Image (spheres, rainbow, N blue to C red):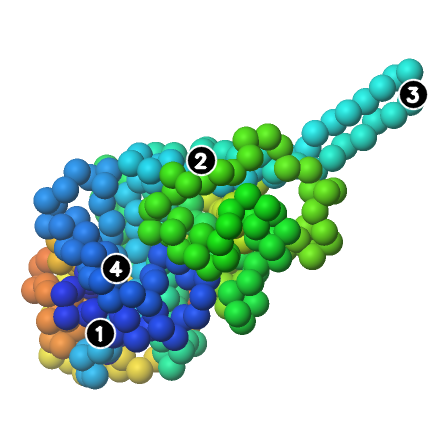
Amino acid sequence: MLVIRPLQENDLDDLYAMAQGAGKGLTTLPADRELLQKKINHARETFNQRIAPEAGLYLFALEDTERKKTVGISGIQARVGLDEVFYNYRLSVTVNASKELGVHVRTPTLHLSNDMTDTSEICSLLLSDEYKGGGSGLLLSRCRFMYLDEFRKHFSEKIFAEMRGVSDANGRSPLWDALGTKFFDMEFSEADMLSGLGNKSFIAELMPKYPIYLSMLPDSARAVIGRVHDNTAPALRMLQSEGFNFNGLVDIFDGGPVVEAFVHNVRTVREGMNRHAMVTRKPVNLDVPSEERVMVSNRSFRDFRVTTVPIDCIGPDTVSLPPEVAEALQIESGDPVRLAPLKDSGLLTKHSYRSSVPGGASKWQS
């Protein structure tokens, strides 16, 4: 069984192995045991509510309970830009015109921006290669929206994701080679690593404050602005299906796009429903395709748990759970749970009609 839960101390070895296999460019999860340990500590302090809400880092592990192994991680940064300035480039247009000469020139430009300050970020998505496909990535990513929905007061109304931009197998970025190297005496991987770890003061000190005219950059650099790394394309498609849209901002190092959405507009949030758990001894076939499964969470802040169950487990007021699923979610009969679609948009809505009371009035609550 695959279960989402808060990251724990004993996840370090598995997390480090995944970070090593991720390659260069995933700066929020560096292959550095000491730094990963600090992230685990930060997450534990967050879930135990020992730090200010705006400083929270919520990191979730995807655990294979049979192997007792962590095979994925995803996260939410409660707020960005409050202790260290958060930078992006905004894609814009500078217009120069002269009626006398009959000239009207529009030039694409990059402007240094701090627009995402005080906004919640979904981040740190990483899944072990052997678990890709079958809905594991969807569970790992979409569980965050269930948590955001459940505990909205801890997050901003608008959320965003900064997508990994284009770089080659050696970690070289065309945008960095054309622009960043002119102002920073370091390799892309080093600069991006420092930024991902929160050491951003050097950006303010060295980056030009004036607009960057894209026409002055080589074709190779212009071509990657707003594009994602091939490995990140599935994550971008998933976010787009949730209602995220490109907001005109890009990463200052590799040009990866920033996408955003309001929490109440996110598909997982809109299509969620409440039920009460009913632990049953009746046989339940858990081995069904991802298209026929839904996510179910225990609605706990500190011990948040999510897994998937077949859509047929859902009744008008309850969801039937085998004992092993209830144990994994740390719930008992009668406990409130939250359901949300795993893959098929509208699956729960369509099912609710089949579960409605006579007369057509649906009994589920959103």
SS state under label 1: helix
Q: Nearer the viewer, mark 4 or mark 1?
A: 4
Asked if the residue under mark 1 is in contact with the one under mark 4, i.e. CB atoms within 8 Å, the reply is no
Dot 2 crowding, Cα within 10 Å, few <14, some 14–19, many 20+: few
Residue 36: quadrant of the picture: bottom left
Residue at point 11% right, 79% down?
281
Q: Nearer the viewer, mark 1 or mark 2?
A: 2
Q: Nearer the viewer, mark 4 or mark 3?
A: 4
Location of mark 1 (residue): 13
Residue at point 39% right, 42% down?
200
The amino acid sitting under disc 1 is: Asp
Location of mark 2 (residue): 204
Asked if the residue under mark 3 is in contact with the one under mark 4, i.e. CB atoms within 8 Å, the reply is no
The amino acid sitting under disc 2 is: Ala
Q: How many marks?
A: 4
* Residue 101 percent location from the top left of the image: 92, 20
Q: Which of the marked residues, 3 or 2, is nearer the chain's N terminus?
A: 3
* Residue 180 percent location from the top left of the image: 56, 48
Question: Would residue 257 appear left or right of 152 to someone viewing this image?
Answer: right
Disc sitting over residue 101 in the figure? 3
